[in-house]
Image (cartoon, helix red, strand yellow):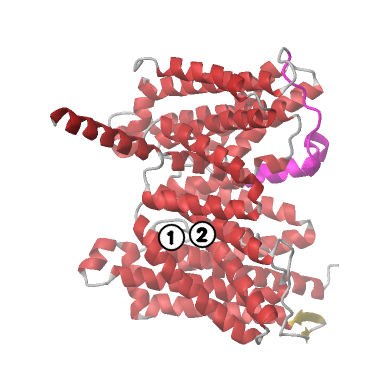
Amino acid sequence: MKGHPFLIIAIVLAVLPFLIGDPYWLHVYIMTCLNICLAVSLRVLWNVGLLSCGHAAFMGIGAYTSALLAKGIGLTPWLGMLAGGSLAFLVSLALGYPALRLTGIYFVLVTFAFNEVFFLIATRLREFTGGPSGLLGIPRPTGIPSGKMAYAYFASGVLLITLTILFRFERSRVGRIWLAIRDTELRSKCVGIQTTQYKLFAFGVSSFFAGVVGAVYAHYIGFISPSDFTIWQSIYAQIYMIVGGVVAFAGPVLGSVVLTVLSEFLRAAGPLQSVIYGTLLAVVMLFLPGGLISLVGYFSRLFRRRTKISSNG
Amino acid sequence: MDSFPFYMQVFTNGVVLSCFYILVALGLNLIMGIMHIVNFAQGTVYMLSAMLLYLLCIEVGLNYFLSGAISIATTAGLGILMERFLFRRLLGQFLPSLVMSLGLLLAIEGGVWLRFGIISKAVPSPFRGMVKFLGASVSYERLVVIIGGLLLIGGLFIFIRHTKAGKAIRAAEQDREAAILHGIEITKICRLVFIVSFGLSAAAAFLVTPMLVIDPNIGHTPLLKGLVIIVLGGMGSVTGTLAGGFIIGFIESMMGSFFDPTIASIVSFILLMGILLVRPSGLLPYRM
């Protein structure tokens, strides 16, 4: 069982949509899958020690590319999603090439500025993006029947592929180098690692998945507008990652699941929603600075200690 | 359009916006310098004290200046509480403190929304009338923001540069351990920074509220502009914040008058990116 966590995840992802059944909660399920993808792709960036407040812009690039290609020249969304991801990848390289000379909060601010520029441009280019009133009638990918259930399975697939690829990446040679750069950038440079290139690559990979997620979202909802891709969207994705915890790969997954489902439960509460949500964020961070994932370690230690005591006595 | 009164209008608008943004940005910058965290709730603090002003002035019916004084004092007190019970516990932990301040932002905004509703409110201005100057007219409200803002900024500048407490703040910014070794009580310094920073945001609210409408979301703009200004000017540097603030304020006012506000935002963000690429640590970085 220990050797095949992905097999278990695959089984869970295959069974869950069927078990949920209810269209509303299937919608929540799809959004959770997409949020997990976003948070995990942000983890790639965190692996080289960077935070981004511009992930929604890359999502938006992917979404608009795929939607416009599908509507304009009738390109099948299957290719459109890849095209969206690829364009996000290219744009992130163009942005990252100069911006990755910056570190820490400066990089956050550049991505943040990028997100703002994207939002404003998407709002102003009316003839292309429909401006603030958005882009309507984005087709579903061919071959996926209408209805939430089919798309939930598609989202499961996207999630599984994303998790597998990014997990492989993290455990690969490149992934180790990323971690080395995060932990000791200067030393990595000294042993001959081209740190900027590896950072650029991490930024590109992260943005590629954001672009794909954006495209999947666009073809699911069928309607996108610039307000889907604001700076707050980026910040929320970053919150999922941090609240989940950055020490383990499962952290962002846990964070996205808990927070997405939580905000759905709180939806009925109106303005009280943000009071509860915000307070919970603050409380979790105060008492679990390592994120929700540190609870898992805590409980497993507790459990182990219990069993040890019982076996002794 | 291209006449003296028009340019005068653009100029005063620029100064008003600059003063407003600088007051919030200085607060952000002080906290960032000493605690090494980004307090995303800074704009919310401004919003909260504007709402307090509304509460005291309209609902309780106090005099504007008295309500202003009470709201500034309350906000500064809130700063002490937040420092003691929230931010001090997460000292030096960048990611958790980031999320915690975002949580505060959401919680406070939601709370204000619950109490006051989402509909915009206005506090009638106690400063009515305008000054005529070479055919251009400047309303008292704007004049108050300009004079009050410049006085506060100047006061802060003198405080940071020339008083003992200000020197202690700078020392703690430069090297925390060395400052502690030299007998600076770091907890007191942190408390002081939070008082000053929250007080500045509350003072900004006191100055600009008569000009603007208030609702639970007004904190976002000054927060975002403040972040841009800090990065533009260089972190931890008061002069840099001043320079960045005037640049952003004037770009906003000029582009907003000549083209439209969206263009103004695009230009200021592109300028930010451009400057960061040429000077990664801002225009006037803090030098020891």
Residue A97 at least partly seen:
no
Callout 2: helix, strand or loop?
helix
Placement of the C terminus of chain A among the 4 image quadrants: top left
Foreground pick, A232 / A270: A270
On residue A26, the disc is none
Name the residue tied to disc 2: B230
Q: Amino acid at mark 2?
A: Ile
Provide residue B222's location: percent of width, then percent of height.
Answer: 61, 62
Q: Give, as a single range, the part of the protein colored magenta.
A: A116-142
Badge 2: few (under 14), some or many (20 or more) residues near its Cα, within 10 Å? many
Where residue B167 sits, quadrant-wise, is: bottom left
Provide residue B25's location: percent of width, then percent of height.
Answer: 53, 64
Q: Check if mark 2's residue and mark 1's residue have beta carbons within 8 Å.
A: yes
Tell which subunit mark 1 falls on: B
Residue B140 shown left or right of residue A306 in the figure: right
Placement of the N terminus of chain A among the 4 image quadrants: top left
Q: Is residue A118 magenta?
A: yes
Badge 1: few (under 14), some or many (20 or more) residues near its Cα, within 10 Å? some
Foreground pick, B177 / B162: B177
Name the residue tied to disc 1: B32
Callout 1: helix, strand or loop?
helix
Q: How many marks?
A: 2
Q: Is residue A156 magenta?
A: no
Tell which subunit mark 2 falls on: B
